[in-house]
Each structure stands twice: as C-alpha cells, then as structure tokens.
Image (cartoon, rainbow, N blue to C red):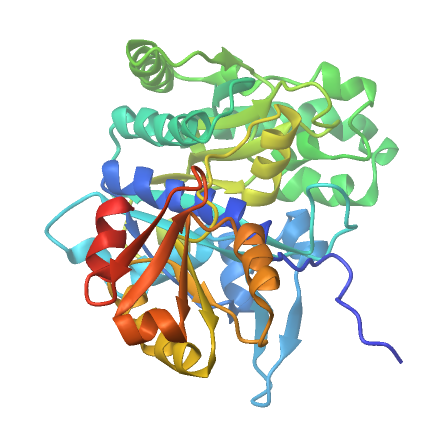
Amino acid sequence: MKIQIPRGTQDILPGTVERWQYVEKKARDICSRFNYQEIRTPIFESTELFQRGVGETTDVVQKEMYTFKDRGDRSLTLRPEGTAAAVRSFVENKLFGQPQQPTKLYYIGPMFRYERPQSGRMRQFVQFGIEALGSHDPAIDAEVIALAMSFYKEVGLKRLKLVINSLGDTESRTAHRQALMNHFSSRVNEFCSDCQSRLEKNPLRILDCKKDRNHELMASAPAIIDYLNEESKQYFKKVQAYLQAMDIDFVVDPNLVRGLDYYNHTAFEIMSDADGFGAITTLSGGGRYNGLVQELDGPETPGIGFALSIERLLMALDAENVELPIEQGLDCYLVSLGDGAKDRLTPLLYQLRANGIKADKDYLNKKLKAQFKTADRLQAKYVAVLGDEELEKGIISVKEMATGEQQEVSLTEIVDFLKRKI
C-alpha cells in the first residue's frame, strides 16, 4: 500500500514555508515589544486537563480530541488548544509566585482536532496565542486586543473587523444563565441532543450550536449585555474607552459569547472582511477567564488571552493579495573549473558561511554553463568563479548578477569584499 500523508494534515514545503517563518517571526517580534515571553508545553497532556480546562460540554472535548491510552493505561490527549496547557504550566511551576506580575506568555505550535477537514480547518494546525495572568485591570484586556490587532496589521491585513462583548461577572452570568434556561426549556426538545444536554450544564453553549443556529428561539434569546450589573457595565466601558484611546475600531455584538463557565467580562473576535475569504470569517478569538486557574488547582488568578490560526491568517493574506516581504536567494554562488579549484572551494564556502554570507556551490560536477544556471535559479546576487589558473594567481573572479559587472578579487580578501558588498 502506498503510504500517504494523513487526512487533515499537510506538508509545508520549501517555497511555502518561508511565509510561515515570516509571520511566526513577526509574532515573536511583536510579543517581545509587548513584553510577552514564550512558553513551550508538551504536544500531549493528561486528558483530564482538557476536560477541566476546555470544558466537558464543548464540542472540542466531546467530539474532536485525539485521545489514547499509553502503556501505563493513562489517558492522554494531543493538545487541541494552547490555553489549558499554558495555565497548567503556570500553576505547576508556580509562576504566580514570581515577583514580576502579571505573567505574560505566548506560544506558537501545532494543535490537533478531529474534525472534517476543509479550507482553513485542518486536523493538525498551528496556533499562535497569548495569555496574561494575574491582573484584573481592564487595561490589560485592551492590551491583549491591541496586540492581536497590531499583529494582523503589521503582516499586511487591512480588511479587519473587531467584535467585542461583555460576559459580565459571576453575578451577571448567573442571572443570564437562568434567563436562558427559562427561554429554552419549554421547547428544548426541538433542539439537537447536544443542546438538550447543555440546557442544565451550560445553556450559554446553546447559542454556539451550529446545527440549530437558525432556530427562531436563537434570535430572541436573552442577551448577556442586558443582565450586566453596574460593576460589569463600568468594566466594559473602561475596555471600550482604552480601545478608543488607541484608535482601534470595534463593534459591540451582544450575541458574541464564549461558552465556558469560567469565561467572564471581555470577549472578542477578529474577522476578515476580505472578498473571497470564505463563509467562516473569524480569524481569532479571545476573552477573560477569571476562574480557569482555580479550576486547574491554582490560586485565585485572573487571566485573559487569545489564539489565532496561522493557516487562516495565510488565507486572509491571499484573499487580500498581500505579498510578504520575504528575502530570497543567496548572497553568493561559487563556481569551480578544474579539480584543484573544486577542492579549494569547499573550505572557502565554509569560510563565507562562517562570516554570515549565504552561499552554496555545485555538488553534481555540472559544466560551467549549468553551474551559472543553478546560480540564477537560486537568485544569487554574486557568482564567484575559480579556475585552476586563477587558483595559481591567488585570485577569484566575482560577477554581480544584477549589473553584469565583473572583477578579480584576491582569495585572501574575498570574504571582506563580499561582506562590504552585501
């Protein structure tokens, strides 16, 4: 049987991977400016972490996790998202005890969800996310949103829409929860089996249902914003004021929810308005989760974060026809004529690379013309030609490919010559 790549995964090949490297480098750069530090957690974790950290009633936990037993009969799961693992590490390594607070973390890495593969949705996908743990200040909510928006804009996206909402504090959510139960209970049998089980456990999740999104009760469901107490209203006003002060445009959407019990106050999504991007317009989402650390056996610690898919970001860049400024090509390609020259190029090539010059040479014993074709294909800025006759004189012929200008340079000075030019 022919071995092929698993469904829902992809090979990212040279020529394409450079785009990934560019946006990942941009993510790391902007996190550094915002004073977020990278965290790297295991690819797989205890299944219980995601059951508690993502939520038993979510589609992710109920339907989409890659879960298996190891040889010790322990249940392990390939991570479906990054927040739970980051918070687990925050608790386990007692980062809450460090003097500098809040703890500001970011991660970039593969996640795994068993769902139907489609454009922009893979079973293995790469997620970039941040978590800010330890502050109740609405200013850090605005900071997290600002970082996400800044990242998208700096990679070149323009057709962006920021949608925000407030889920309120525990008191507000309790009142809203009861209102939702009253609203749906008499006709819940008209909804899917998942929604029927969610009514008692977490009625807010009903609003996220994909199967019943067009049911008439969805449109008339009570909005959380109508159940905010005064403290929650003031908190939300502060977040909006900070965003306005930073000239970040947004739309308040009372129907935007994050369905986990420990989410509260600020929730947001960033969407693409680009033509041809697709029916699913969401690029990223985030929110405040003031109960998650406690849920994972840590001390009472507020948190807020977001996560985005690199795959969907690249799709949005394509939809807006954004060309990333990726530097391509070699600085220098070495061409040899004769056995003596060929032997001399091997240490010279190493010397160039050791001095920060991107260089390569032929390893297939090609003719002179073919070596120049290779140099052209590799977009080399300079081609340096060494023959046995030049070797005897201690020189090498250097050609600038853009201008055609050619000159002879001492072999002892070629490194400094190219460093000056490049």
Considering only vertical position in the picture, is 42 above or below 70?
above
User: In this image, 4 relative to 142: left or right?
Assistant: right
Residue 5, position as x, y percentages in the image: 75, 67
Image-quadrant location for residue 295: bottom left
User: In this image, 122 relative to 17: left or right?
Assistant: right
Observer able to see residue 183: yes
Considering only vertical position in the picture, is 173 above or below 291?
above
Q: Which residue is outermost to the bottom?
A: 71
Q: Nearer the viewer, residue 178 or 147?
A: 147
Image-quadrant location for residue 197: top right
Considering only vertical position in the picture, is 117 above or below 243?
below
Residue 101, position as x, y percentages in the image: 17, 45
* Residue at x 72% of width, y 14% of height: 220
Q: Where's the N terminus, which quadrant? A: bottom right
Image-quadrant location for residue 40: bottom left
Residue 19, position as x, y percentages in the image: 53, 44
Q: How many marks?
A: 0
User: In this image, 187 relative to 44: left or right?
Assistant: right
User: In this image, 374 relative to 59: left or right?
Assistant: left
* Residue at x 27% of width, y 53% of height: 418
* Residue at x 37% of width, y 17% of height: 236
Observer able to see residue 296: no
Considering only vertical position in the picture, is 298 above or below 292?
below
Q: Nearer the viewer, residue 128 or 285?
A: 128
Q: Nearer the viewer, residue 53 or 66?
A: 66
* Residue at x 28% of width, y 10% of height: 245
